[in-house]
Image (cartoon, rainbow, N blue to C red):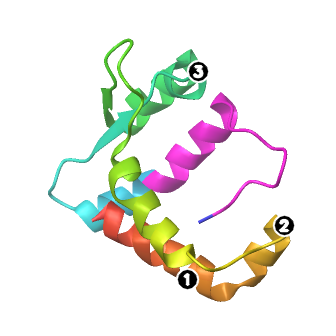
Amino acid sequence: MELLKQGQTVNSERYVLTLRALEPRLRRVRRDKDSVLQHENTRPHTSRQTRDALRQLELTTLSHPEYSPQLAPSDYFLFPQLKKYLRGHHYDNDEKVFADGAVYSRLNSLLTVCAN
């Protein structure tokens, strides 16, 4: 897992790099199961560059309908679990969060559960 530095944003180019890194893992972990990526209607997810990469990688997507509440599955599982884990922890800045190996480890374990 790679985190963006503070002030960086996800653009189409960055998102395509993430998809290219994710694709081999999906093939290895999911094997015979079809994987479907749920996309929001944000520019990095809907750009021509992203659509071309998805076609090339043969990845299937499920888009949010137009004008729907922008709730992703992570809103129901990942964030509440992470919020529960972080309750009582206080960090002054991002570096202190990254320095806490337990937080990073917990986030990775939650992401693994989400991926399966």
Of callouts 2 and 3, the N-terminal one:
3
Indicate yes or no whether the magenta region holds residue 86: no
Please report the residue visible at 54 percent of the width from the left and 24 percent of the height from the top.
42
Q: Circle 3 — which element?
A: helix
| Left or right side of 44 for 8 | right
Please report the residue visible at 49 percent of the width from the left and 68 percent of the height from the top.
82
The residue at which mark 2 appears reads as 93
Label 2 vs label 3: CA separation? 28 Å
Of callouts 2 and 1, the N-terminal one:
2
Q: Circle 1 — which element?
A: helix
Q: Position of residue 87 (x, y in %)?
A: 56, 75
Q: Residues within 10 Å of mark 2 (few under 14, many from 20)?
A: few
The residue at which mark 1 appears reads as 105
**First to last magenta residue range:** 2-22
* Depth order, front residue of 103/35: 103
- Vertical position of residue 46 compared to residue 89: above or below: above
Looking at the rendering, which quadrant does residue 98 occupy? bottom right
